[in-house]
Image (cartoon, grey):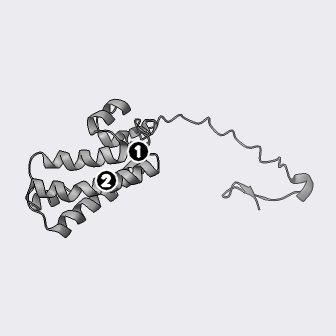
Amino acid sequence: MNATIKAHGGSGRIYPYCSDGLNKATTGHTSEEICVIAEVRETRDGLDTSHLALQLLGESEQIKAMDREKVQGNAAIQQAVDPVHETIEKIALRFNLHNEKLLYDHSPRVSGGTVRTLALPIPQRDKSQYACRDYYGETPFDPQLDCCI
């Protein structure tokens, strides 16, 4: 996204305008508000999968709008992306994505930082006893498969 803005003559405040426009459209909050509500440092860590998917669609549509209208400069970029923000907001509202309950720290799930507990060791099996012996009779045991054959 940043490369496209730069290619269209954008600079300075237009970068946060485009990203915060998508944040407000998808969640109803700015990136700063999202970080406070979700208690995260990075905005994306507080977003639900639905928000992220909708933001990716929004970024793609912003790029298409800038390219389609061949805009140059911050003012033209802003005019090109504003309709995209409105469309994304309508989608978010339709699917109730402005619900603050969807904003929380998703980073443990995403980064693999989940708490792992060790499982109890598997007890040794008594290979002379099988639950199905009475039904099937004596069956040979294959140690490579660790089961009856």
Q: Is residue 80 left or right of 37 when viewed as pictured?
A: left
Instruction: Give the residue at mark 2.
Output: 86
Element assignment for label 1:
helix
Instruction: Give the residue at mark 1.
Output: 110
Q: Is residue 104 above or below residue 131?
A: above
Q: Is residue 146 above or below residue 48?
A: below
Depth order, front residue of 68/44? 68
Q: Quadrant of the N terminus?
A: bottom left
Depth order, front residue of 79/127? 79
Horizontal and vertical percent for residue 98? 41, 42
Q: Is residue 5 left or right of 31 when viewed as pictured?
A: left
Quadrant of residue 43 within the rendered picture: top left
Q: What separation in Å lies between label 1 and label 2 (alpha carbons)?
A: 29 Å
Check disc 1: other Cα within 10 Å, few if <14, some if 14-19, many if 20+: few
Q: Is residue 125 above or below residue 143?
A: above
Of mark 1 and mark 2, the one earlier in the sequence is 2
Residue drawn at x 46%, y 36% is 101
Horizontal and vertical percent for residue 18? 21, 50
Residue drawn at x 42%, y 36% is 100
Depth order, front residue of 144/132? 132
Task: Look at discs 1 and 2 and give the one toward the viewer.
Answer: 2
Q: Is residue 40 left or right of 6 when viewed as pictured?
A: right
Residue drawn at x 39%, y 48% is 51
